[in-house]
Image (cartoon, grey):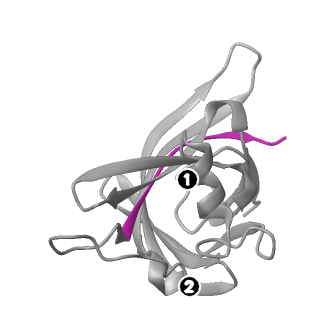
Amino acid sequence: MATTKWTLDPTHSELQFKVKHLMITTITGNLKSFTAELDAEDDEFENSKISFEGDINSLDTGNTDRDHHLKSADFFNAEQFSTMEFQSSSVRKEGSDYLINGNLTIKGETKPVQLTAEFGGIATDPWGNTKAGFTLSGKINRTDFGLTWNTAIEGGGVMVSEEVRLLGELQFVKQA
């Protein structure tokens, strides 16, 4: 069966992370620059191959000082590790969702992760492009990837939680 390539439409896609700060509120960050490709055997996307690369220097939390700290050696060390990458190892359909297993590399550390993609459907835009949409979600432990900076806070707890939630709205364009 022929493989169909789908490439990310960056103007209609976003990728976010959410992490607890002081264990009482959630801070949201965005990766402003990233690419992704999906190779599928059909429009059901089961058994697809998915790859992703994100530019750490495009990380934006809406606070310049925090962004500089996240890009520093305390966290991502963007000077030495400028990208994060994901490569799927399996994609299987479960109900209306897809479970995506693969390897995520951050700061030179590669670990297996599982993501869930809710399939939004396929549509043709006004210019004749066939698009597929997905809502992506998952969780990682940031310390698994060498993102270990933290500090204890008065009264107990820590400044930044270890759990990081990943969220994405991804639109792909079918290639001819």
- Can residue 34 be found in the magenta stretch? no
> Residue 55 appears at what percent x and percent y?
74, 57
Residue tagged by mark 2? 146
> Residue 65 appears at what percent x and percent y?
60, 50
Q: Residue at x 59, y 62 (%)?
A: 70
- Can residue 168 be found in the magenta stretch? yes
Q: Quadrant of residue 150?
A: bottom left
Placement of the C terminus among the 4 image quadrants: top right
In the picture shown, does residue 11 fall above or below 84? above
Q: Hey, what amino acid is under mark 2?
A: Gly
**Does residue 15 appear to the left or right of 27 in the view shown?**
right
Q: Hey, what amino acid is under mark 1?
A: Arg
Query: Is most of the magenta stretch helix, strand or loop?
Result: strand
Q: Residue at x 70, y 60 (%)?
A: 56
SS category of the residue bearing label 2: loop
**Does residue 83 appear to the left or right of 17 in the view shown?**
right
Residue tagged by mark 1? 66
Placement of the N terminus among the 4 image quadrants: bottom right
Say whether marks 2 and 1 touch (CB < 8 Å).
no
| Residue situated in front as seen by the camera: 158 or 107 | 158
- Write the start and end of the magenta stretch as one range: 163-176
